[in-house]
Image: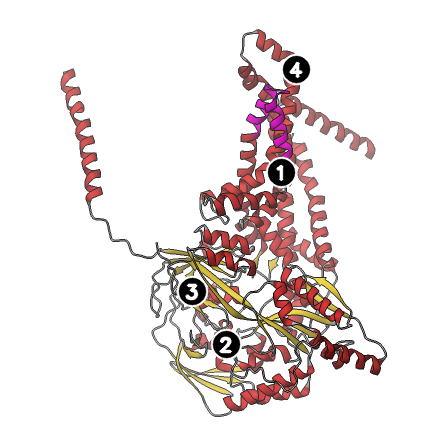
């Protein structure tokens, strides 16, 4: 009996083992599913933190590059030119030549990530919840004129308004979703990607998953993680280490390191970030044109660029975006570096007012390049006979002290990122806007801006050129240089769209396995 | 014991009041508010409305009072920067900080005890000198510098470990080693001294006389008696560990409370900064209380002393009132 019980067991174990080995061998021989050539998940190292999943609440490069993937705008920027093209509206036209009413025909069969259908009521709802002052200042109301048609009425003529409809601040959100969940409802768009809230830590990383029911072409990648690195060197190390597939913005002195790495592709371009000096024209001594002229002549832009070590920066002559159609470098007065002319201006100032006032330069010294720039400006002015003292602060301090309603600065060093359409320059010149750091309320400027908004393209260009000449000769702002931008990715990464504004579209990014 | 715990919990009230008031006042002294960092080109009228809504047009004490009223109701405030409640933000980041701090403490204890035992057993030898020198070095190295060095070596040069983030389990290694180094050095020195003191006691001689080997005496008797000072030092160092985590989290892009706090300070987000600091202060106090209770459980003499001290304190308070 004993033998009967043990014998089968003794036979079973080797048999099972043999079966397992055979199964393993067969599994090894079985042709595996062909692997696709692309990774299912791509990680991007970003230079600014993503915090809010609501396109109407915030607008900056860090958020816009995510919003561009999650949401759609009524008009979409052309990847090559940046000009507004079809988006959620497949066609549009001005109702007449006054540039005050825009008729849009909406795309049909589009669904939100919440499951709701897209329709004209979503356009009305979105347009009414916009907080951006530039858009709000032009917008009046939206009316539904058909099952797939709306008319947007403006408060005044603005030929450039279609550009706003291609910006992320006007990204369309679902009315039903927001009304159902006021806190999270705005996080649903119609774009190719949707937020993975469970795997997102605001301020650190955001995870996006592919939206399978998107009306557009489906991306190859299934998940995209955008990770924030406060430190540029850490971002490069992570890229070299293969932890991330793409890195946005490298420090100037690391361009060369990245370029030498055989595993990386590096794209360096002239960005739209204009570094400038802005005088507070409402108070002493920034209101003195001779002093502003003296500073303009005293500035050697090439020396400033060398000091910050930006290898691809371009000296700036105008305060306009280089991509704007009205951009010009032709001015009757040449205000480029001329120490003799600067000293002459100072002599004339001394003659007219008896003294040469000292200038206090407000600068955000938490960023090393600003500090370096400010010190070079200080030295260049000293050589021209102008005493400049630095008022060091951080980003918040600089903003707080240069408000339009209560400016405390005399002159400040700052950067503005300009869009490619002409009227975006109004941010530097319009009264009541916080980026008007010269605190200008000049009637001629306001009149030029208003006339340009209601004019056709050619006439608008002429008026904007006149505005540039006026700004150049008055030296309210002294443009210094357009800094370079840089994006690097691991060899084989494809699908990144570099827009002319220096912003990126990662909707179709893919990385090889 | 229960009264002692209650007493310690009541002590949290002045801690919370002090921390929150300091944060509010100091952040008010710096120029700018969180509303100055809003990158959405809001109109001046809209900004003025928000200034009023957040109380920036009133004194810092008004805002503080309003905040504390909310805090009493369990509301840590609403961050305009993140567009969400601070409590939710804090709780979202807390696990990362706890994981980092926990790993660092465990690593520090795991390494410091054997090192201290080795140093104590070879007291005066080159090994002892070497371990002591390493401990001094560990205590002297700033976190941010050590972190960058480790990152350069293990991530950049050797490509062995991730340089930062919290994407995979290996991501924890470099930040926890960085954070553990200072604590490990401190614990090694404390434990070594405690071991040397214990080794001089009579019971050690008795144990040896009974035939136990040196390692047996150390593990079974001496080490157990040094647990209380070790735990006390760990509890006392927890504040430093959490403080160090702020730096380490920023070096390694670790998504913890420390990084949230630094970002909030940069953005002048007083509501988030205060919420994070209050919760951190409460957390440290509670952990220290837990460590005290643990010490008392391990050492009954200490438990008796706590009860006695408390009784004396209560008698004095009663006498004063009479």
Q: Which mark is residue A506?
A: 3
Spatial separation of the CA atoms under disc 2 and disc 4: 80 Å
Q: Which residue is mark 1?
A: B238
Instruction: Decide which of A333, B203 is in the foreground and name it.
Output: A333
Please say if the residues under marks 2 and 4 sit with CB atoms less than 8 Å apart.
Answer: no
Chain designation of label 2: A
Task: Identify the magenta region.
Answer: B112-137
In the image, residue B290 above or below residue B297: below
Q: Is residue A98 visible?
A: yes
Foreground disc of the pair 2, 4: 4
The residue under label 2 is: A127
- In the displayed structure, A18 sits above or below A342; it is above
Question: Label 2, label 3: how many angstroms apart (C-alpha)?
Answer: 25 Å
Q: Are marks 1 and 3 on the same chain?
A: no
Query: For the residues carrying marks 2 and 3, which lies nearer the camera in this image?
Result: 3
- Of callouts 4 and 1, the N-terminal one: 4
Q: Quadrant of the N terminus of chain B?
A: top right
């Amino acid at each position: 009996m004993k033998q009967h019980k043990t014998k089968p067991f003794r036979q079973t174990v080797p048999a099972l083992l043999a079966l397992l080995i055979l199964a393993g061998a067969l599994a090894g021989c079985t042709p595996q599913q062909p692997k696709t050539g692309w990774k299912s998940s791509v990680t991007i190292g970003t230079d600014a933190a993503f915090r809010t999943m609501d396109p109407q609440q915030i607008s900056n490069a860090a958020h816009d590059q995510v919003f561009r993937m999650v949401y759609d705008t009524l008009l979409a920027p052309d990847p090559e030119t940046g000009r507004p093209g079809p988006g959620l509206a497949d066609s549009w036209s001005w109702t007449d030549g006054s540039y005050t009413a825009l008729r849009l025909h909406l795309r049909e069969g589009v669904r939100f990530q919440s499951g709701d259908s897209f329709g004209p009521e979503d356009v009305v709802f979105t347009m009414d919840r916009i907080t951006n002052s530039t858009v709000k200042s032009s917008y009046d109301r939206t009316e539904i004129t058909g099952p797939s048609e709306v008319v947007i009425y403006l408060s005044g003529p603005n030929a450039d308004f279609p550009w706003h409809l291609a910006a992320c601040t006007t990204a369309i959100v679902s009315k039903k979703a927001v009304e159902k969940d006021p806190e999270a409802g705005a996080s649903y768009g119609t774009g190719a990607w949707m937020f993975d809230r469970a795997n997102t830590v605001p301020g650190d990383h955001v995870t996006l998953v592919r939206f399978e029911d998107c009306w557009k072409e489906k991306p190859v990648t299934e998940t995209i993680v955008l990770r924030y690195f406060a430190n540029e060197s850490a971002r490069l190390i992570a890229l070299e280490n293969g932890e991330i597939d793409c890195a946005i913005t490298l420090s100037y002195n690391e361009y060369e390191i990245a370029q030498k790495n055989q595993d990386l592709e590096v794209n360096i371009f002239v960005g739209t970030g204009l570094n400038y000096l802005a005088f507070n024209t409402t108070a002493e001594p920034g209101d003195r044109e001779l002093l502003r002229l003296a500073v303009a002549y005293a500035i050697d832009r090439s020396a400033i660029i060398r000091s910050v070590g930006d290898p691809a920066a371009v000296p700036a002559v105008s305060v306009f975006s280089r991509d704007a159609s009205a951009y010009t470098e032709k001015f009757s007065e040449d205000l480029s570096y001329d120490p003799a002319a600067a000293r002459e201006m100072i002599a004339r100032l001394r003659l007219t007012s008896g003294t040469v006032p000292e200038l206090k330069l407000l600068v955000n010294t938490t960023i090393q390049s600003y500090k370096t720039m400010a010190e070079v400006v200080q030295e260049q002015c000293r050589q021209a006979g102008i005493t400049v003292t630095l008022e060091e602060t951080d980003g918040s301090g600089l903003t707080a002290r240069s408000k339009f309603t209560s400016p405390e600065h005399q002159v400040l060093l700052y950067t503005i990122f300009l869009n490619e359409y002409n009227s975006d320059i109004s941010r530097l010149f319009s009264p009541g806007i916080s980026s008007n750091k010269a605190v200008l309320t000049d009637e001629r400027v306001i009149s030029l801006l208003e006339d340009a908004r209601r004019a056709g393209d050619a006439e608008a260009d002429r008026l904007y050129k006149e505005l540039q000449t006026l700004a150049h000769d008055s030296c309210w702002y002294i443009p210094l240089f357009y800094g370079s931008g840089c994006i690097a990715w691991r060899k084989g990464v494809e699908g990144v769209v570099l827009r002319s504004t220096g912003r990126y579209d990662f909707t179709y990014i893919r990385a090889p396995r | 014991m229960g009264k002692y715990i209650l007493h310690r919990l009541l002590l949290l009230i002045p801690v919370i009041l002090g921390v929150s008031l300091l944060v509010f006042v100091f952040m008010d002294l710096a120029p700018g508010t969180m509303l100055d960092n809003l990158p959405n080109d809001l109109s001046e009228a809209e900004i003025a409305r928000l200034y009023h809504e957040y109380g920036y047009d009133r004194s810092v004490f008004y805002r503080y009072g309003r905040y504390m009223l909310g805090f009493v109701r369990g509301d840590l405030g609403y961050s305009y920067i993140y567009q969400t409640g601070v409590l939710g933000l804090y709780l979202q980041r807390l696990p990362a900080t706890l994981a980092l701090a926990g790993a660092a403490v465990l690593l520090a204890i795991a390494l410091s005890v054997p090192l201290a035992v080795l140093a104590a057993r070879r007291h005066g030898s080159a090994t002892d000198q070497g371990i002591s020198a390493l401990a001094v070095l560990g205590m002297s190295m700033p976190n941010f510098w050590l972190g960058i060095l480790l990152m350069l070596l293990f991530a950049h040069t050797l490509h062995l470990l991730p340089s930062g983030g919290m994407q995979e389990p290996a991501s924890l290694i470099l930040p926890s080693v960085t954070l553990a180094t200072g604590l490990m050095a401190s614990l090694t020195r404390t434990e070594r001294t405690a071991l040397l003191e214990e080794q001089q006691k009579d019971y050690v001689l008795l144990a040896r006389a009974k035939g136990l080997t040196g390692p047996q005496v150390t593990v079974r008797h001496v080490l157990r008696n040094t647990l209380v000072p070790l735990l006390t030092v760990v509890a006392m160092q927890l504040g430093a560990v959490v403080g160090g985590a702020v730096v380490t989290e920023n070096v390694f892009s670790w998504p913890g409370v420390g990084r949230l706090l630094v970002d909030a300070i940069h953005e002048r987000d007083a509501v988030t900064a205060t919420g994070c600091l209050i919760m951190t202060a409460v957390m440290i106090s509670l952990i220290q209380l837990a460590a005290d209770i643990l010490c008392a459980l391990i050492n009954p003499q200490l438990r008796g002393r706590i009860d006695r001290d408390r009784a004396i304190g209560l008698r004095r308070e009663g006498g004063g009132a009479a």
